[in-house]
Image (spheres, coloured by chain):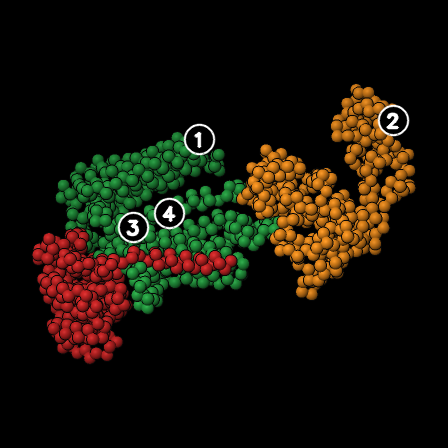
């Protein structure tokens, strides 16, 4: 485990007679997104908060990059760890730029460097700096506030990012969007992220590995695929849900199974398509549907096999076009291919 | 922006009441109280209440004063909206001016006719007419604001004529020629003798120093109490109990310890510390002023959302940084509200400081009580009220400007 | 946290000291005090201006408060001099001293003064100087018309009226009711009693009571006044005669702290010159100038001092 960035060694936290965390042993690799999940009261938030010593363990120790995390004063430790919470906690009396610049200021960065960094981060989280830097938190929507929260956490470029149900208070559409953007950001910054949630869908979408906790104990710590296919016990199986196969389908990008559209001639199909344009001949069913003018359901190229299955059902289990953002067809999910994959599931494509 | 809709029958009630008040005052109430000497006021032997009618040539005055009220009455009944608003405001201002500017000549005319004696004071009629016309003018301003067609700077400018009247009254007080009205004359004498200025200065000193001390100590205790729950509880309880003590009793109780202190360390007397005077008064006032500040500091600090505090700690702020960078800026508007309360409270209670020889405007109030002279009481009370109003306005403005911009915005504005 | 708390405590102490007033002059001035009512203000101004006219350094601490407050101020050294009444000292200030106070003592101006002089000098190092020939004693007054109607001109007449079933509604100030040398002394001497329910206690001083009597407010038909009040002629009141001398004598005289007399040897002669020129009639007229004609006590005092040649 020497290449682990965060290690829990026999960590327990006791409140009175209740064990919130019970002898936890866990190691998180650098650049990995580890999601802590479990029912209410399982100790996931407590575990998270022990990393940056907002909660002190009753027993055991936590190592960060090989050193115990109580070797330095807690404030110093926390300035090197990003922290994002559900309530966001933006300082209402400061502008967005000032909020983002809090930790750099605490660390004594020169003003010019702070300003640069603020611009960089606002762009990273999808907020146009010129528009947002002088706004106040009360002028922002929930989604915008949380983006600023993430920017603020990343300001001092900490190697570790702690996130405690950061998208829990947002509406589902914004939540989906921010989850996807987080994945994008992570591709760029490659932080070690510890993420707490109670939403299995979110965990499956974001995690490299998922730690399932119950009553303070670690029940299973595995990749999403293994959790779905090899749940450690009945509890995990129930927790994951009865539709775990469908969830597993949701882990497979549609591009892995689709047949790309030939010779890049962009065609328009789907809800925004107009009938008068040239069409390729994919197959009888689809051709018939298109000829009849009824619009087949489509799958976005960014979608998963689960979306493809859903679209295929709407198409009467026929061929399903895969479209890009503008509605151009970029590929096809053939009926036979889809049925074949389902029958052999998990097979190669989904092999955990 | 237009205000809530009003029914067709809902004309300006305020204007109606004000106008009716003026007319009743003109017809029924005492306009001038007259007496050969100040002590004889209220005595059946010597006081002569004169209604306007008995002063020769006063029908003109009566008409002048009553006319705007009659117009205002009609306007209140008939028209609403901007036109009604302008009429109301105009008649209110004209009426105020009529009452004010005719009062001195009326008294002079009465003296010439031998009806008014040496000491002449406004009766309830004049005061209520001023109140009535003030209500009419204000009703007009409300109408104009409701109609929404008048820009904000113009609305503020509507206060100017009333302010001008007050300024004129102030100027009269400073002029050398003795006024006709006894109250003005007493004011003039006291101002010329420098008494009002001196007592005002003492009053501001007493209230100002003790308010400052209350603020410094109160905020410090409030901050301390944020970290120690028991301190907060005790501080709130004790400062509340202090406020229930009658101020007279508290000042009297403070005399002895300070006298003992001054006797033990005579050098303190050189700095004016003793059983009487400013030291016990300021101490007493400071103690009174603590509760609003402590209470508001406590409330303000606890009003900061848990999310902000968790974020602040989580990003590595020390407790001191959390206090000064997050808690205090947020609590500031609430603390300023407490400061305002304290200032007004202490300006009022400082009038009692005279009882232990500390001076202030209470000097005039006590003299007035001893000599049964309402004029002297007012010489003390009116400046105190004006100071309190002024302090309130200044502190309100200060509070607004010290509030961080981000906190002045309403929450959840954007979808 | 602790460091700045200490700093705060220091700041508060400094502010408190600074706030308490200006530093004193090099040679400590003579601090002249007085009570809150008109006669006291006049006497205080007279003392203040007379001393100043003789080149002595003075400080104005007039209008300090009621009797108790001003006396305590003198005893604790807050002020150096004020004008007190001999009777008040004997009956109120010396009340705990266990002195034997006989009616003869009380009704003799000279005996009262001598006693007060001796006791204060030995016990408190407070020196009494020349008294004025005035008696500002408590008195009961009625409206002249009422007196004529009911044939009550003296206190024995009043006793007879009350004991014969007549009802008196009385206006008093707080001190007159509380002090043993007040209403209670009249009642003891002349054998009558006014039920306290029939007593209206008004503000400090004696003008509210005189006004209430003149107005007949709440049925008031008798009131407390002082012997030298300006209200008596103003409201056409009649002071009921006190043939048995129930009331002690209240001569105004300057009382000073012993240290100050030693420090300024010229004080006795200056003050004697002043108080020697004051008698009851003069005092009442001075009072009327302020209360009835609305003049300033300082101006009235200055005019009088010019008249007697003390000031220019």
- Looking at marks 1 and 3 on the same chain, the residue that comes earlier in the sequence is marked by 1
Q: Residue under label 2, please give it.
A: A282
Figure quadrant of residue B108: top left
CA gap, disc 1 and disc 3: 42 Å
Identify the element where label 4 is drawn: helix
Chain identifier, orange in the render? A
CA gap, disc 2 and disc 3: 97 Å
Task: Between residue B311 and residue A102, name the one nearer to us.
Answer: A102
Q: Residue under label 1, please give it.
A: B149
Q: Residue under label 3, please give it.
A: B200
Chain identifier, red in the render? C
Instruction: Give the drawing colour for chain B.
Output: green
Q: Residues within 10 Å of mark 2 (few under 14, many from 20)?
A: some
CA gap, disc 3 and disc 4: 14 Å
Of all chains, the one bearing label 2 is A
Q: Closer to the observer: label 2 or label 1?
A: 2
- Left or right: where does residue B88 sit relative to residue C226? right
Task: Between residue B340 and residue B365, name the one nearer to us.
Answer: B340
Image: B318 above or below C280 = above
The residue that appears at 66% across and 38% down in the rendered structure is A125
The residue that appears at 24% across and 52% down in the rendered structure is B376
Q: Residue under label 4, please give it.
A: B391
Q: Closer to the observer: label 1 or label 3?
A: 3
């Amino acid at each position: 485990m020497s290449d682990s960035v965060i290690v829990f060694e026999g960590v327990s936290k006791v409140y009175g007679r209740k064990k919130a965390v019970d002898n936890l042993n866990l190691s998180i690799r650098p650049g990995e997104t580890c999601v802590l999940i479990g029912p209410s009261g399982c100790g996931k938030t407590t575990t998270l908060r022990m990393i940056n010593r907002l909660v002190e363990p009753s027993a055991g120790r936590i190592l960060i990059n090989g050193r115990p995390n109580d070797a330095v004063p807690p404030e110093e430790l926390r300035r090197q760890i990003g922290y994002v919470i559900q309530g966001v906690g933006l300082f209402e009396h400061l502008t967005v730029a000032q909020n983002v610049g809090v930790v750099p200021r605490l660390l004594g960065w020169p003003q010019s460097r702070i300003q640069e960094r603020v611009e960089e981060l606002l762009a990273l989280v999808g907020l146009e700096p010129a528009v947002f830097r002088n706004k106040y938190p009360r002028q922002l929507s929930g989604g915008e506030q949380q983006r600023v929260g993430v920017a603020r956490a990343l300001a001092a470029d900490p190697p570790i990012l702690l996130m405690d149900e950061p998208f829990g208070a947002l509406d589902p559409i914004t939540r989906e969007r921010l989850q996807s953007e987080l994945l994008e950001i992570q591709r760029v910054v490659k932080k070690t992220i510890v993420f707490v949630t109670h939403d299995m869908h979110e965990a499956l979408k974001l995690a490299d590995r998922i730690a399932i906790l119950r009553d303070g104990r670690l029940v299973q710590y595995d990749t999403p695929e293994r959790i779905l296919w090899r749940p450690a016990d009945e509890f995990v199986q129930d927790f994951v849900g009865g539709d775990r196969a469908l969830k597993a389908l949701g882990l497979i990008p549609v591009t892995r199974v689709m047949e790309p559209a030939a010779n890049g001639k962009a065609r328009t199909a789907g809800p925004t398509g107009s009938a008068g344009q040239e069409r390729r001949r994919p197959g009888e069913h689809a051709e018939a549907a298109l000829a009849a003018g009824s619009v087949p359901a489509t799958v976005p190229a960014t979608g998963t096999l689960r979306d493809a299955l859903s679209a295929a059902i709407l198409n009467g289990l026929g061929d399903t076009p895969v479209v890009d953002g503008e509605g151009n067809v970029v590929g096809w999910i053939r009926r036979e291919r889809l049925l074949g994959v389902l029958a052999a599931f998990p097979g190669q494509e989904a092999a955990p | 922006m237009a205000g809530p809709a009003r029914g067709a029958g809902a004309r300006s009630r305020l204007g109606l009441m004000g106008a009716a008040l003026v007319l009743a005052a003109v017809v029924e109430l005492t306009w001038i109280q007259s007496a050969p000497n100040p002590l004889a006021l209220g005595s059946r032997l010597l006081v002569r209440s004169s209604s306007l009618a008995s002063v020769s040539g006063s029908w003109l005055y009566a008409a002048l004063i009553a006319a705007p009220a009659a117009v205002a009455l009609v306007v209140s009944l008939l028209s609403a909206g901007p036109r009604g608003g302008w009429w109301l405001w105009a008649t209110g201002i004209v009426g105020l001016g009529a009452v004010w500017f005719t009062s001195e000549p009326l008294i002079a005319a009465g003296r010439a006719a031998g009806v008014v004696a040496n000491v002449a004071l406004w009766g309830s009629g004049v005061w209520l007419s001023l109140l009535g016309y003030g209500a009419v003018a204000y009703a007009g301003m409300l109408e104009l604001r409701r109609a929404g067609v008048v820009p904000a700077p113009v609305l503020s400018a509507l206060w100017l004529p009333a302010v001008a009247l007050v300024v004129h009254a102030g100027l009269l007080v400073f002029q050398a020629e003795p006024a006709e009205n006894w109250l003005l004359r007493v004011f003039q004498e006291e101002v010329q003798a420098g008494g009002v200025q001196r007592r005002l200065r003492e009053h501001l000193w007493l209230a100002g120093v003790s308010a400052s001390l209350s603020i410094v100590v109160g905020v410090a205790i409030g901050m301390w109490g944020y970290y120690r729950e028991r301190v907060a509880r005790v501080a709130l309880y004790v400062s509340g109990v202090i406020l229930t003590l009658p101020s007279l009793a508290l000042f009297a109780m403070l005399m002895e310890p300070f006298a003992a202190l001054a006797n033990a360390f005579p050098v303190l007397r050189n700095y004016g510390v003793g059983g009487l005077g400013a030291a016990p008064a300021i101490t007493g006032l400071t103690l009174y002023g603590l509760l609003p500040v402590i209470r508001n500091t406590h409330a303000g600090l606890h009003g900061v959302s848990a999310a902000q505090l968790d974020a602040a700690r989580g990003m590595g702020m020390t407790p001191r940084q959390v206090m000064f960078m997050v808690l205090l800026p947020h609590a500031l508007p609430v603390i300023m509200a407490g400061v305002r309360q304290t200032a007004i409270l202490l300006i009022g209670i400082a009038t009692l400081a005279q009882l232990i020889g500390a001076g202030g405007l209470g000097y005039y109030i006590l003299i007035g009580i001893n000599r049964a002279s309402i004029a002297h009481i007012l010489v003390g009370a009116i400046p105190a009220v004006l100071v309190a109003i002024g302090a309130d306005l200044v502190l309100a403005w200060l509070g607004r400007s010290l509030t961080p911009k981000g906190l002045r915005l309403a929450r959840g504005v954007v979808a | 946290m602790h460091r700045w708390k200490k700093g705060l405590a220091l700041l508060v102490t400094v502010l408190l000291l600074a706030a308490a007033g200006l530093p004193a002059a090099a040679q400590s001035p003579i601090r002249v005090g007085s009570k809150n009512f008109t006669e006291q203000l006049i006497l205080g101004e007279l003392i203040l201006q007379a001393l100043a006219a003789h080149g002595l350094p003075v400080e104005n601490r007039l209008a300090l408060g009621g009797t108790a407050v001003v006396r305590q101020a003198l005893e604790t050294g807050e002020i150096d001099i004020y004008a007190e009444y001999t009777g008040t000292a004997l009956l109120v200030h010396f009340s705990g001293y266990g002195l034997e106070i006989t009616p003869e003592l009380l009704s003799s101006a000279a005996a009262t003064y001598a006693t007060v002089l001796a006791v204060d000098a030995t016990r408190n190092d407070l020196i009494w100087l020349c008294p004025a020939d005035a008696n500002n004693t408590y008195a009961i007054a009625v409206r002249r018309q009422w007196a004529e109607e009911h044939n009550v001109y003296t206190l024995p007449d009043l006793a007879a009226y009350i004991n014969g079933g007549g009802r008196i509604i009385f206006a008093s100030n707080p001190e007159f009711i509380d002090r043993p040398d007040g209403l209670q002394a009249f009642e003891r001497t002349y054998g009558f009693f006014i039920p306290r329910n029939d007593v209206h206690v008004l503000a400090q001083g004696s003008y509210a009571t005189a006004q209430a009597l003149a107005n007949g407010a709440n049925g008031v038909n008798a009131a407390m006044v002082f012997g030298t009040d300006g209200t008596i002629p103003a409201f056409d009141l009649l002071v009921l005669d006190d043939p048995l001398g129930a009331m002690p004598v209240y001569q105004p005289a300057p009382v000073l702290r012993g240290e100050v007399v030693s420090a300024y040897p010229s004080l006795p002669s200056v003050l004697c010159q002043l108080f020697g020129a004051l008698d009851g009639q003069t005092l009442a007229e001075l009072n009327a100038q302020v209360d009835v004609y609305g003049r300033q006590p300082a101006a009235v005092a200055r005019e009088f001092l010019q008249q007697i040649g003390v000031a220019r």
